[in-house]
């Protein structure tokens, strides 16, 4: 089994912020799913459809769409498409690293 290190801030800061303050637990689940896959890529981005995220997380497609919009608004991810029907590419941002917080595994 391959282990994916997760920054401590994801659980100590982002979890209470998204789930407690924003009341968006689905957004936290989607972020964790994207984080898991993006961590394996050098540019921290993955190409995943809304349906594939929904299938993997057990959320509805509309919950995934709403969560992605919230994560984009919070600038935790950036989503781009080559064209309107293309599978989106999601780039995971880790703004806590820019704030000088050290990466804790």
Image: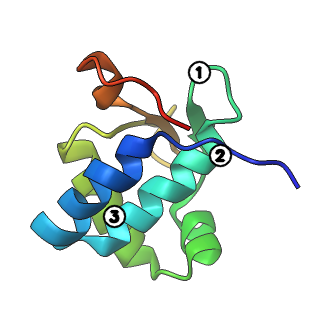
Coordinates of residue 7 in the picture (x, y in percent): 47, 39
- Crowdedness near tag 1: few (<14), some (14–19) or many (≥20) residues, C-alpha within 10 Å: few
Residue drawn at point x = 33 percent, y = 64 percent:
27
Above or below, 20 relative to 2: below
Find residue 37 and name its label: 2
State the residue lying farthest toward the right: 1
* Among the two numbered marks 3 and 1 on one chain, the one whose residue lies closer to the N terminus: 3
| Residue 37 seen by the camera | yes
- Crowdedness near tag 2: few (<14), some (14–19) or many (≥20) residues, C-alpha within 10 Å: some
Q: CA separation, marks 3 and 2?
A: 16 Å
Coordinates of residue 40 in the picture (x, y in percent): 71, 35
For residue 9, which quarter of the picture? Answer: top left
Find residue 27 and name its label: 3
Coordinates of residue 39 in the picture (x, y in percent): 62, 36
Secondary structure under badge 1?
loop
- Crowdedness near tag 3: few (<14), some (14–19) or many (≥20) residues, C-alpha within 10 Å: many
* Among the two numbered marks 2 and 1 on one chain, the one whose residue lies closer to the N terminus: 2
Secondary structure under badge 3?
helix
Which image quarter holds the N terminus? Answer: bottom right
> Label 1: which residue?
43
Q: CA separation, marks 2 and 1?
A: 11 Å
Query: Which coloring applies here?
Result: rainbow
* Among the two numbered marks 3 and 2 on one chain, the one whose residue lies closer to the N terminus: 3
> 82 and 48: which one is in front?
48
Above or below, 94 relative to 55: above
């Amino acid at each position: 089994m391959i282990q994916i290190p997760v920054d401590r801030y994801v659980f100590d800061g982002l979890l209470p912020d998204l789930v407690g303050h924003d009341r968006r637990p689905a957004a936290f689940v989607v972020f964790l799913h994207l984080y898991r896959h993006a961590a394996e890529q050098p540019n921290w981005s993955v190409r995943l459809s809304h349906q594939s995220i929904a299938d993997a997380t057990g959320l509805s497609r509309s919950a995934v769409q709403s969560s992605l919009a919230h994560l984009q608004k919070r600038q935790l991810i950036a989503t781009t498409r080559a064209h309107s029907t293309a599978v989106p590419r999601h780039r995971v941002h880790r703004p806590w690293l820019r704030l000088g917080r050290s990466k804790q595994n």
